[in-house]
Amino acid sequence: MTINNDDVIKWLQTYDQVITENKDYLTDLDSIIGDADHGANMHRGFQAVVTKLPGVQDKDIGSIFKTVGMTLLSTVGGAGGPLYSTLFIQAGNRLNGKMELTLSDWAEALEAANNGIIRLGKAAVGDKTMVDALTPAVQTLLDASKDGTSFEEALHLSADAAKKGMESTIPLVARKGRASYLGERSAGHQDPGATSSYLLLKTAADVWTKE
């Protein structure tokens, strides 16, 4: 199985719908430990992304990702804008010229994306950020690409790993971002950025493995 540019467009369109459905949930999470705007910001950003997709649907996947990243940078407020912009731009840089993705392409692109986020946010696993969801998902994809796991199975395994990483943020005390201002009071609450990151990978698994 490979993923083509049409599949990527469908994933992004579906993620916009998922964010719309979860906008209030993400904002509720963010109201407890952040600025109460993550859902609204992500919704605004991906609504803008969807309007740009018809203009890039015939482009290579790297170009599509970089267009998404630049759109998010200009439309998403708060910390989420630069972080999600970095995710797509760094992934796009790894996918320059590609019209189809293999499992190893996807794993390496997400690894580059996650590394970019780590550099920008100076965050590590355990800091209660989106890195807690992305890092285990990336490692799962890299392992799967070496083990001969099918692309379909690897997508679901990576979404499961992201979900566990997201849930692992609940007991953590935040060490980065607005949530870190709360100190011990940030414990007991799920990180909104880890949640939207999980939803991104779950949507990829759902869209790309449907018959």
Image (cartoon, rainbow, N blue to C red):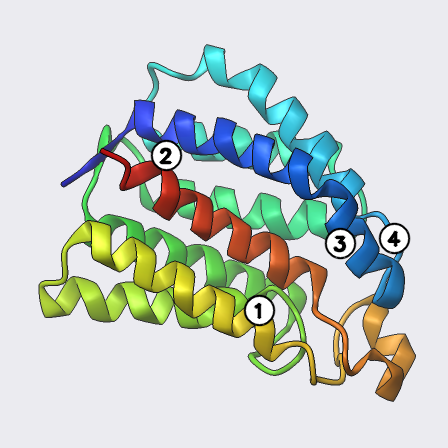
The answer to whether residue 74 shows anywhere in this view is no
Q: Position of residue 102 (x, y in %)?
A: 18, 45
Residue holding disc 4: 36
Dot placed on the residue nearer the N-terminal end, 3 or 1? 3
Q: Residue 134, position in %: x, y?
A: 49, 64
Q: Residue at x 74, y 50 (%)?
A: 25
Mark closest to the chain's N terminus, 4 or 1: 4
Q: Are marks 2 and 1 in contact (CB under 8 Å)?
A: no
Label 4 – label 3 distance at C-alpha: 12 Å
Q: Earlier in the sequence, mark 2 or mark 1?
A: 2
Q: Is residue 151 left or right of residue 138?
A: left
Question: Relative to the observer, which residue lies in front, 194 or 119?
Answer: 194
Q: Nearer the viewer, mark 4 or mark 2?
A: 4
Q: Determine crowd level at label 4: few under 14, some 14-19, many 20+ residues with C-alpha closer than 10 A.
A: some
Horizontally, residue 2 falls left or right of residue 23, namely left
User: Which element carries disc 1, helix, strand or loop?
Assistant: helix
Mark 2 — residue?
62
